[in-house]
Image (cartoon, rainbow, N blue to C red):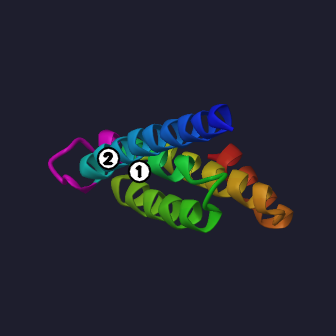
Amino acid sequence: MNKLVQFILTLFLIHCSVSDGQNKRLDSLWKVYNEAKQADTCRLNAIHKIAWTYTNTKPDTAILIAEKEKQLALEKKQVFYIAKAYNTIGYTCSNTGNYSKAIENLQTALKL
C-alpha cells in the first residue's frame, strides 16, 4: 500500500510541476502580447502560441484567441499571421468534429 501512495503522490507532483511550468509560459506569452511596445511580429507570435496551446484542451478558447490573432494581424497587415490564425481555427474545428468549418478555414489559410 505504501508504494501505491508514493506512486500517486509522485504523479500528483509531476502534474503540478508541469501545470505550473505551463502557466508560467502562458503568463510570459500574455505579457509579450499585451505590451504594445513590443514588435508586431513578437506580439503576433506570442498570441499564436497561446492559441495553439489550447487547441486540444480548450477548443473554444483556442478559437477565440486565434480570432484575436487574426484581428491584430489584419490591423498590422501581416498576411503570414492571418494565415496562421485561420490554420489554428481550422485545426481546432477539425478536432471538435466541425469539419465543414475546418475545411473552410484551412483552405483560406492555404490561399493566403
Q: Which residue is mark 2?
A: 43
Picture coordinates of residue 46 (x, y %)? 38, 44
Q: Which residues are magenta?
A: 34-44
Q: Which residue is mark 1?
A: 47
SS for tag 1?
Answer: helix
In depth, the one of 36 and 51 nearer the eye is: 51
Residue at 48%, 39% in the rendered image:
13
| Magenta highlight on residue 40 | yes
**The disc labelled 2 sits on which kind of residue?**
Arg
Residue 112 location (% of width, % of height): 61, 46
| Drawn side of residue 48 relative to residue 105, left or right | left
> Is there CB contact under 8 Å for labels 1 and 2?
yes
Residue at (70, 44) in percent of width and height = 110
Residue 86 appears left or right of 76: right
Report how far apart the C-alphas of labels 1 and 2 lie in the structure: 6 Å
Packing grade of label 1 (10 A; few <14, some 14-19, many >=20) is many
* Residue at screen point 77% across, 55% down: 95
Residue type indicated by callout 1: Ile
